Amino acid sequence: MANVNVTSKFKIAGQNAYYLGNPGGDSMVGTYAIMLQNDGSFSGTVTVKARIRMLQEWQSDTVTPVAWSYLTYYLNGASTAGVFSTGITTTSIIFVPASGLQVVLDCASYSSGYLTVYTAPCQGAAA
């Protein structure tokens, strides 16, 4: 399993931790809007995690991301509203509060296929 820095569009196709960048600048409240699109054969689970952003040289890059809740209206192929920390297994649209945090999509369980991930940084709070 590797740590992978990603851009606004990427594929989850293996057991990796995918690190998203800063959504809103150092002084703004930030949220990530994220859509995960199943190719039809994805078999795995993606967990949303977060850790403090590494802004200072003295901050260690060994800070471990932890499970992080997100807001959704469409989760795992169904219209579902609420706040969750459920593993994502298929097409979903989520909003991740990210002020001061680095968001990580962690695929620790993977068998086949891929999810195409689209991210959009948003100014303001998720809810």
Image (cartoon, grey):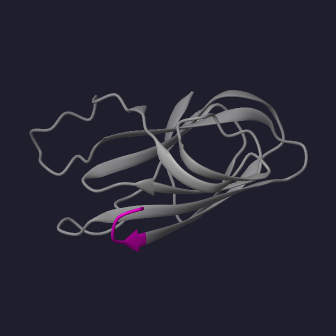
Query: Residue shown at 72%/42% (left/top)?
Result: 13
Query: Residue shown at 33%/64% (left/top)?
Result: 30
Horizontal and vertical percent position of residue 63: 28, 30
Horizontal and vertical percent position of residue 9: 61, 64
Image quadrant holding the N terminus, namely top right
In this orientation, which residue lies closer to the viewer: 86 or 118?
86
Q: Residue furthest left?
A: 58
Is residue 126 inside the magenta stretch? yes
Horizontal and vertical percent position of residue 52: 25, 42
- For this view, does 35 lie left or right of residue 98? right
Is residue 113 inside the magenta stretch? no
Q: Residue furthest right?
A: 40
In this orientation, which residue lies closer to the viewer: 54 or 120?
120
Query: Residue shown at 64%/31% (left/top)?
Result: 15
Query: Residue shown at 12%/45% (left/top)?
Result: 57
Horizontal and vertical percent position of residue 55: 17, 51
Q: Residue furthest bottom?
A: 123
Count of labels shown? 0
Q: Main secondary structure of the magenta part?
A: loop
Image quadrant holding the C terminus, namely bottom left
Q: Which residues are magenta?
A: 122-127
